[in-house]
């Protein structure tokens, strides 16, 4: 089987220690020659400047294609487009356009004064510029705010029709979840690539809590598997095995690209990539 094209998501550091961890993660995973990497916003747009700094630093230092997350939260339309101008000036022309989570303590999203009301409006504005490639999010399991069973497919189609060229899914635990969603999207006339988002399970209790918050269904067998693995000291081995199996099933079903949510930790993602046949490139050092 041909190795997949892979990409990685990072998030901006919160302190000096996490800055070093991010640097080590980017350095290690860059050797796997990702097709692109992405950098997130914090909830409520709280890391806007940090995101910009990380995006431009990765692009400049490693020469990697970087997709900068951009949200509709806490910014006017002109402020948002000013951010895009800065990215383009720095040579970054890949944007992940998202509505974004509401600020902490705010129960629901409310558009800022003179801001974009939703991700479709943001995509439309970016597409009119003509100087950026637009990626968007997709939800194979129902988004917590989805009004009906097909709402996420309909919303994705609106974003693609508005000018997005590809989508990256929220993480999921079983390949059938992705295939059901992909088939619905094809039936709805969506032709753009839908890249599966993979979350290596570093710590099951944390991922489980995160999944509940995202509305991602948790298979009973996963709870049972991690209970046994943690008791026997085999949790990391289980995580690599499960993710490798999930990715293999996705590839066998036609997925050619995989996007890894690294959580700024290279180990599990690197081990999974190696198991899938993705080899690190050799970096030649100049010897004086």
Image (cartoon, rainbow, N blue to C red):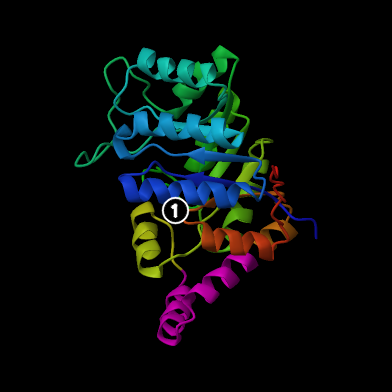
- 128 lies above or below 6: above
Which residue is found at the position 42% from the left and 20% from the top?
83
| Front-most of residues 47 and 172 | 47
Q: Is residue 147 left or right of residue 7?
A: left
Q: Is residue 286 left or right of residue 61?
A: right
Give the tally of numbered discs: 1
Q: Is residue 89 highlighted in magenta?
A: no
Q: Is residue 223 highlighted in magenta?
A: yes
Rendered location of residue 128, percent (x, y): 55, 13
Locate the C terminus and report the quarter of the image it occupies. Answer: top right
- 159 lies above or below 178: above
| Front-most of residues 135 and 200 | 200
Which residue is found at the position 19% from the left and 42% from the top?
105
Rendered location of residue 167, percent (x, y): 58, 39
Which residue is found at the position 33% from the left and 17% from the top?
76
Residue projecting furthest to the front? 288
What span is in magenta?
219-246
Rendered location of residue 174, percent (x, y): 56, 64
Q: Which residue is mark 1?
A: 263
Residue projecting furthest to the bottom? 232
């Amino acid at each position: 089987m041909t190795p997949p094209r892979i990409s990685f998501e990072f998030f901006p550091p919160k302190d000096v220690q996490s800055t070093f961890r991010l640097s080590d993660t980017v350095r290690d995973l860059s050797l796997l020659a990702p097709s692109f990497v992405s950098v997130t916003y914090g909830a409520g747009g709280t890391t806007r400047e940090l995101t910009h700094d990380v995006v431009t630093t990765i692009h400049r230092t490693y020469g990697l294609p970087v997709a900068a997350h951009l949200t509709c939260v806490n910014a006017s339309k002109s402020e948002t487009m000013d951010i895009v101008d800065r990215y383009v000036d720095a040579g970054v022309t890949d944007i992940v356009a998202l509505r974004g989570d509401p600020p902490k303590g705010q129960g629901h999203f409310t558009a800022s004064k003179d801001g974009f009301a939703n991700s479709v409006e943001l995509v439309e504005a970016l597409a009119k510029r003509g100087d950026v490639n637009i990626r968007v999010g997709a939800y194979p399991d129902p988004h917590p705010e989805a009004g009906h069973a097909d709402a996420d497919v309909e919303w994705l189609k609106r974003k693609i029709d508005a000018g997005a060229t590809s989508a990256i899914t929220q993480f999921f635990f079983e390949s059938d979840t992705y295939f059901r969603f992909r088939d619905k999207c094809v039936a709805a006339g969506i032709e753009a690539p839908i890249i599966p988002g993979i979350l290596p399970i570093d710590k099951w209790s944390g991922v489980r809590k995160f999944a509940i918050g995202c509305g991602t269904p948790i298979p009973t067998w996963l709870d049972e598997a991690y209970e046994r693995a943690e008791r026997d000291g085999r949790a990391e081995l289980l995580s690599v095995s499960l993710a490798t199996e999930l990715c293999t099933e996705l590839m066998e079903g036609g997925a050619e690209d995989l996007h890894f949510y690294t959580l700024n930790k290279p180990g599990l993602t690197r081990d999974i990539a190696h198991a899938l046949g993705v080899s690190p490139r050799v970096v030649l050092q100049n010897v004086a």
